[in-house]
Image: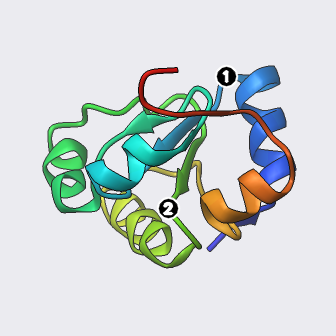
Amino acid sequence: MKQVTVHEAWEAVRERGAVLVDVRELHEWNEMRAVGARHIPLSELEGVLAARALPSDVELLFICASGNRSQVAVLSAMERSYAAVANVDGGTVAWFLAGLPVERSGS
């Protein structure tokens, strides 16, 4: 399973059009999220992947709070033949601690 740092993820989103997919629950998403992330809770991801509702021509970077749920998401995407997928190591905690841009509900 490919792992990327938060800095590598941010660069991939900005420079290569990678899609950052946040698989945390809604209350976590509302508290704080990486700028530009798309919210798909892990409990809904399988249906989204089965419907091929995520692009398959760009890298998909999965992120959660610390990296555990996003690893499950990466494996699910790989099982659905998404080839360019990676786990964001350290999750949103590492993203925030690295000083990368975040949003909060209402901001």
- Give the structural element (helix, strand or loop) at label 1: loop
Residue type marked 2: Cys
Above or below residue 106? Residue 73 is below
Residue ID at (52%, 51%): 83
Indicate the quadrant containing the N terminus: top left, top right, bottom left or bottom right: bottom right
Q: Is residue 104 above or below residue 45?
A: above
| Residue 4 visible | yes
Tag 2, which secondary structure? loop
Q: Residues within 10 Å of mark 1 (few under 14, many from 20)?
A: few
The CA span between labels 2 and 1 is 19 Å
Query: Is residue 44 rendered to the left or right of residue 9?
Result: left
Residue kind at label 1, given as amino acid type:
Gly
* In this picture, residue 82 sits left or right of residue 67: left
Tell me the residue that label 2 is attached to. 64
Percent x, y for residue 99? 85, 45
Observer able to see residue 87: no
Q: In the image, residue 85 lies at what x, y percent?
A: 56, 53
Q: Residue at x 77, y 38 (%)?
A: 10
Residue 58 position by quadrant? top right
Q: Residue furthest front?
A: 106
Q: Nearer the viewer, residue 98 or 104?
A: 104
Q: Position of residue 63 (x, y in %)?
A: 54, 56
Residue 11: name its quadrant: top right
How would you rate the neighbour count of disc 2 (Cα within 10 Å): few for under 14, some for 14-19, many for 20 or more? Answer: many
* Viewer-nearest of discs 2 and 1: 2
Q: Nearer the viewer, residue 15 or 99?
A: 99
Disc 1 target residue:
17
Q: Is residue 78 above or below residue 45?
A: below
| Residue in view at x 29 percent, y 57 percent | 25
> Which mark, residue 106?
none
